[in-house]
Image (tube, helix red, strand yellow):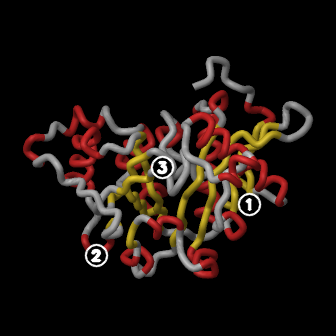
């Protein structure tokens, strides 16, 4: 977190409107993923100093913009990929790690969250709340019923993460009818320690704050972890019914003539956690 929180009077969140803004969001992603966290860029990414993939042209890019310096500066971003857009492209990003047919066949309108990051000096609760409020508004506007993505732990040694992975498996596994499953060639069992040997209260303290926050509002976990060598992470698949958030944290107020709700405070706390190929 920044020692001196930025003045948020001139900071706002909206969707990127131009290719230039999308490229600026990609440059921010490169700085956080590859320079701060030492992910492995392709030669083209390293040359351009931008993180990009084939999904970017088809997605919506939520951006946090700081206009205090005269020229707008993008300081946070989140990639939003809807079912309609994913079907045009061919698949969701998460499909590269998990079989998500159970989610796609559920009949719910879905949204994949991905490539999220915020500059270190802006990782304060007010700024991160803005980012989550933008997601909440998008969910309401597009009538999204389920969010999903690949949340991550730093590190690629599952044994070092045996306690939290086993805890997620035993206490938060999604029902079989809705359960995403890691692809066979990438599947790493999360059931490494018997349930009776786990202390849930202790292990909760070991979870990345964003994953812990998701669990508090009823998020469910898919079966199997996945090692992402490019980003240096161990991933789990998270899914969340948006109605749960609305029921527990709804706060009515007038905005553009519509009612909305404020995102839960704990979703704006803590360290980076990768969501569908990025850090949140």
Residue wearing tag 3: 249
The residue closer to the viewer here, 12 or 75, is 75
Q: Nearer the viewer, mark 1 or mark 2?
A: 2
Judged from the image, the secondary structure of the residue bearing numbered disc 2 is helix
- Residue 55, how many percent across, how many down? 64, 67
Quick one: which residue is furthest to the top in this view?
A: 3
- Residue 190, how many percent across, how many down? 24, 53
- Residue 94, how many percent across, how many down? 48, 65
Quick one: which residue is furthest to the front in this view?
A: 43
Q: Nearer the viewer, mark 3 or mark 2?
A: 2
Q: Spatial distance from mark 1 to mark 2, Cα to Cα?
A: 38 Å
Which of pointers 1 and 3 lies earlier in the amino acid sequence?
A: 3
User: From the viewer's perspective, is 83 left or right of 207?
Assistant: right
Q: In which quadrant is the N terminus drawn? A: top right
Judged from the image, the secondary structure of the residue bearing numbered disc 3 is helix
Marking on residue 257? 1
Vertical position of residue 158 compared to residue 15: above or below: above
Q: Residue at x 79, y 37 (%)?
A: 66
Q: Are marks 1 and 2 in contact (CB under 8 Å)?
A: no
The residue closer to the viewer here, 215 or 30, is 30
Q: Residue at x 60, y 66 (%)?
A: 81
Which of pointers 3 and 2 lies earlier in the amino acid sequence?
A: 2
The residue closer to the viewer here, 142 or 206, is 206
Q: Residue at x 17, y 49 (%)?
A: 192
- Residue 138, how many percent across, how many down? 64, 61
């Amino acid at each position: 977190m920044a020692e001196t929180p930025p003045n948020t009077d001139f900071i706002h969140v909206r969707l990127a409107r131009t290719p230039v803004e999308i490229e600026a969001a990609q440059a921010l992603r490169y700085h956080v993923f590859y320079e701060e966290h030492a992910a492995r860029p392709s030669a083209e990414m390293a040359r351009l100093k931008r993180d990009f993939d084939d999904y970017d042209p088809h997605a919506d890019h939520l951006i946090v913009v700081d206009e205090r310096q005269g020229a707008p500066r993008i300081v946070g971003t989140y990639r939003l990929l809807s079912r309609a857009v994913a079907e045009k492209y061919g698949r969701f990003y998460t499909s590269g790690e998990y079989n998500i047919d159970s989610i796609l066949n559920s009949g719910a309108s879905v949204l994949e969250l991905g490539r999220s990051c915020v500059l270190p000096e802006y990782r304060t609760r007010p700024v991160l709340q803005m980012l989550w409020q933008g997601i909440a508004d998008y969910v309401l506007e597009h009538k999204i019923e389920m969010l999903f993505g690949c949340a991550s732990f730093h590190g690629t040694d599952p044994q070092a993460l045996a306690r939290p992975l086993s805890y997620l498996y035993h206490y938060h596994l999604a029902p079989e009818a809705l359960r995403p499953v890691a692809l066979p060639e990438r599947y790493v069992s999360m059931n490494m320690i018997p349930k009776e040997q786990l202390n849930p209260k202790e292990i909760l303290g070991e979870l990345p704050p964003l994953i812990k926050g998701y669990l508090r509002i009823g998020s469910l976990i898919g079966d199997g972890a996945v090692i992402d060598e490019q980003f240096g992470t161990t991933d789990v698949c998270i899914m969340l019914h948006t109605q749960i958030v609305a029921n527990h944290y709804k706060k009515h107020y007038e905005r553009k003539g519509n009612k909305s709700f404020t995102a839960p405070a704990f979703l704006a706390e803590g360290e980076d956690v990768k969501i569908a190929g990025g850090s949140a």
